[in-house]
Structure formats: C-alpha cells, structure tokens
C-alpha cells in the first residue's frame, strides 16, 4: 500500500464512518437476535439506539443508512456471504460475525462509495474488537473471496 493510500485509509478509519459501522453493528445485532426486518420496527430500533447515546454523533447518517441498506438487501447479502463461504450456513455463523459480514458485504457488493480494501479492513477491526479469536481470519477470508468475485479486488 502506498503512503498516500495509507494516509487516506487512516482518515477513513478514524472518522465518523468507523463509528457508524460500529453503531450499525450494534443495531443489526439486535435486529438479527429478534428476527426484525420490518421497516417500521427498524426505524424504532434506530431511534431507540441513538436516544441512548450522548451528544451529537457524526457518523449517525451513515450508520442509519447502513442499517437500512443491510435490512433492505438482507437476503441478497446473505446469499453473497453464503456463496463466498459455502462451507458455512449463514444462520450457523456467530451472530456478531455474520452482522460484521453483512455490513462489509453491503459496502462491497451494493455500494461503490467505499473501496473494498477499506470495507474489509474495517470489518476485520470490528471482528477483532467484538468477535472471537478466530473472527478476524474468518471475516477476512470470506470478504476477500466476495470482493474478488465482484471484481473489487485483484
């Protein structure tokens, strides 16, 4: 990675989108645990989540957009994850891992706003922070295969 792209990545990592991804993970985890995908209930969950945080959250618009997009594309995202890791059923993956994968899979497969490398690195960081000892490697391998299948990595 060149020095310029490393600086660009650090700015992305340390900014509001990092916090947005973490918040989106929390909300998606809760929605997944309760089996909620109806838009009205998703909006209620988002409102309740943000109401418990103090101060202005710079990443809120992106966090909200991520949650809504993942819920909207849920089945297609799960299929993309499934095809990138055929030895694992998505419903058998650790709940935190599959929701980290959903966020990054959305960014890789359905959005061109985030470079695939950034989406993968952010997902790995979330997996290290919130997952098990094996989560980071599992997330990395799955997303690498997904990004390559979508032509987003060489």
Image (cartoon, grey):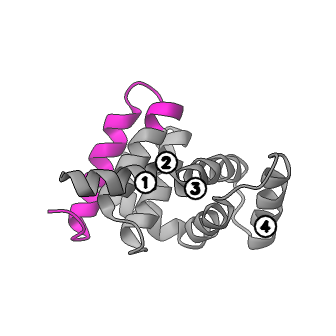
Q: Where is residue 142 in the image (x, y as percent from the top left)?
A: 31, 49
Q: Left or right of 50: which side holds 9? A: left
Residues at marks 2 and 4, CA–CA distance in whole angstroms? 27 Å
Q: Helix or strand or loop: what does disc 2 sit on?
A: helix
Residues at marks 3 and 4, CA–CA distance in whole angstroms? 21 Å
Q: Which of the marked residues, 4 or 1, is nearer the chain's N terminus? A: 1
Q: Determine which quarter of the picture holds residue 61.
A: bottom right
Labels 2 and 3 touching (C-beta < 8 A): no
Labels 2 and 1 touching (C-beta < 8 A): yes
Q: Name the residue under label 3.
A: 16
Q: Name the residue under label 2.
A: 14
Q: Which of the marked residues, 3 or 4, is nearer the chain's N terminus? A: 3
Would residue 35 be seen by someone viewing this image from the given angle?
yes
Q: Mark 1 points at which residue?
A: 11
Q: Where is residue 108 in the image (x, y as percent from the top left)?
A: 37, 65
Labels 3 and 1 touching (C-beta < 8 A): no
Residue located at (83% from left, 62% from top): 44
Q: Left or right of 15: which side holds 133? A: left
Nearer the viewer's eye, disc 4 or disc 1? 1
Q: Which of the marked residues, 2 or 4, is nearer the chain's N terminus? A: 2
> Would residue 144 be counted in the magenta stretch?
yes
Residue located at (55% from left, 53% from top): 21
């Amino acid at each position: 990675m060149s020095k310029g792209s490393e600086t660009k990545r650090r700015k992305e990592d340390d900014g509001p989108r990092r916090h947005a991804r973490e918040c989106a993970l929390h909300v998606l985890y809760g929605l997944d645990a309760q089996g909620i995908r109806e838009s009205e209930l998703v909006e209620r969950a988002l409102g309740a989540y943000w109401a418990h945080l103090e101060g202005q959250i710079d990443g809120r618009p992106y966090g909200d957009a991520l949650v809504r997009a993942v819920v909207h594309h849920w089945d297609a995202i799960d299929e993309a994850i499934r095809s990138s890791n055929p030895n694992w059923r998505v419903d058998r993956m650790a709940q935190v891992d599959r929701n980290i994968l959903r966020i990054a899979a959305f960014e890789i497969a359905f959005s061109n706003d985030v470079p695939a490398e950034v989406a993968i690195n952010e997902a790995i960081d979330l997996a290290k922070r919130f997952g098990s000892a094996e989560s980071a490697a599992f997330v990395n391998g799955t997303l690498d295969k997904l990004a390559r299948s979508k032509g987003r990595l060489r």
